[in-house]
Amino acid sequence: MRRLASNSLGTLSSLALFGCQSIIGADFGSVQAAKVCVPLHAPTRPADLPMATDTVDFTVVLDELAFGDDGPDAGASRSVGYDQDGVCTVPGGPPSCKAYPWLDAKPLLDGDDGRDDAVGGLFAAQKAVFGGALIGSDEENAGVMAGTSAPPGVLRVRGFSGLATDDHVVVELFQAAALDFGDSAELADGGMRRPALDATDHWPIVRATLTEDDAGTDVASSQRDDDAFVVDSTLVAHFDHLLLPMHNIYVEVSKAVLSGHLAYDASTGWVLRDGTLAARILTDFLLGFVPLATRSTVNVSLCTDDVANYQVVKKVLCGAADLPAKDDDPDSSCEFTSLGLGFQSSPASLGPVVDIVPPPSPCSPDTDPGRDTCATRE
């Protein structure tokens, strides 16, 4: 994880010069405006999907993450995720919600094919301002590969037919911890436990999202879709809620859809390739997430009494909200921030059940951003 200079948070005030819209890379230019936008969604279940004979079970870990914060057009093209609001918000096009009046913000523009991924834009903004990032694709991938950061999850698929079409598949996303979680013993070469990216990796599974404890014969995740399906060799699953780790801080997302191309190798078995996860985060939650992230990465708290920096960061975060409080209601307030995530996967095994204690806020109750809201300026 790259560390920022000691005065990095002081440079946050420079964000105000850019404005929320430019900070998250929302200006597409005339080329984007000329494009015809057809919103991209995950495959839908065909009405006449035939029944399949179900025989195959497999487990993978989600890795090689892409939040849409890399490349020359990071934060603007937003090439990961799906359309989540049914609207292609392009220059001169319709917004899907109303920003809070105090923000005085223009509608946040969508990426290619109407993709919604404001989180990718926020991650890209860190790099533009600081020359580094607290959290982003590079940082998360490096942590997962080092065994020190939790992956988005361990996915277990049951009842798959092994063919290109399947009307009924059970998909569970297990909330995982870092591979070296609780492992204080160093390896022979002096390093910590690193993933082999095969079934010998037994990822620790977090108890909080299990429906059965480790005393049972088999653990089960509450993060599940008991009616997932496969069409054209693409697995599609939906989840009402998920807990996804970002630098080992677990973020609650909702209305999540996950898809990926099913691929088989005789030596490793089944995996998902070129996967996509799209979801939304309550923007007010991000306000409380910031001090946890800054404390864990640069050992600095960003509380509401930091007059020089907190209000600037709040405006940027609240200005990234791009999804409505009420679906299909452009007159409702922008209360959610979209997340798009691309991923690959590798064979994996479920490991021991562990307990994760959420980190306490480094701020006092009176200065905790977790008690703040985007609905008001102060």
Image (tube, rainbow, N blue to C red):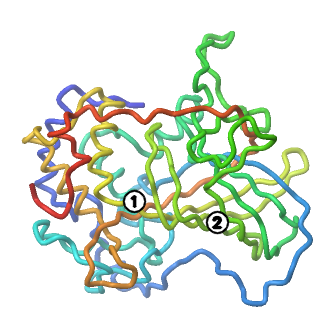
Q: Are marks 1 and 2 in contact (CB under 8 Å)?
A: no
Residue flagged by tag 2: what amino acid is it? Answer: Ser
Residue at the disc numbered 2: 259
Q: Position of residue 55 (x, y in %)?
A: 91, 61
Q: Which element is circle 2 on?
A: strand
Mark 1–mark 2 Cα distance, whole angstroms, equals 19 Å
Image quadrant containing the C terminus: bottom left
In this rendered view, identify the residue nearer to me: 236 or 346. 236
Q: Position of residue 289 (x, y in %)?
A: 32, 45
- Quarter of the figure with residue 22: bottom left
Q: Position of residue 318 (x, y in %)?
A: 23, 60
Tell which circle, 1 or 2, labels the residue nearer the N-terminal end.
Answer: 2
Mark 1 or 2: the one toward you: 1
Q: Which element is circle 1 on?
A: strand
283 lies above or below 214: below
311 lies above or below 280: above
The residue sitting at 22% across, 65% down in the picture is: 21
The residue sitting at 12% across, 72% down in the picture is: 101
The residue sitting at 61% across, 32% down in the picture is: 354
Give me the disc on residue 281.
1
Residue flagged by tag 1: what amino acid is it? Answer: Ile
Q: Position of residue 238 (x, y in %)?
A: 60, 67
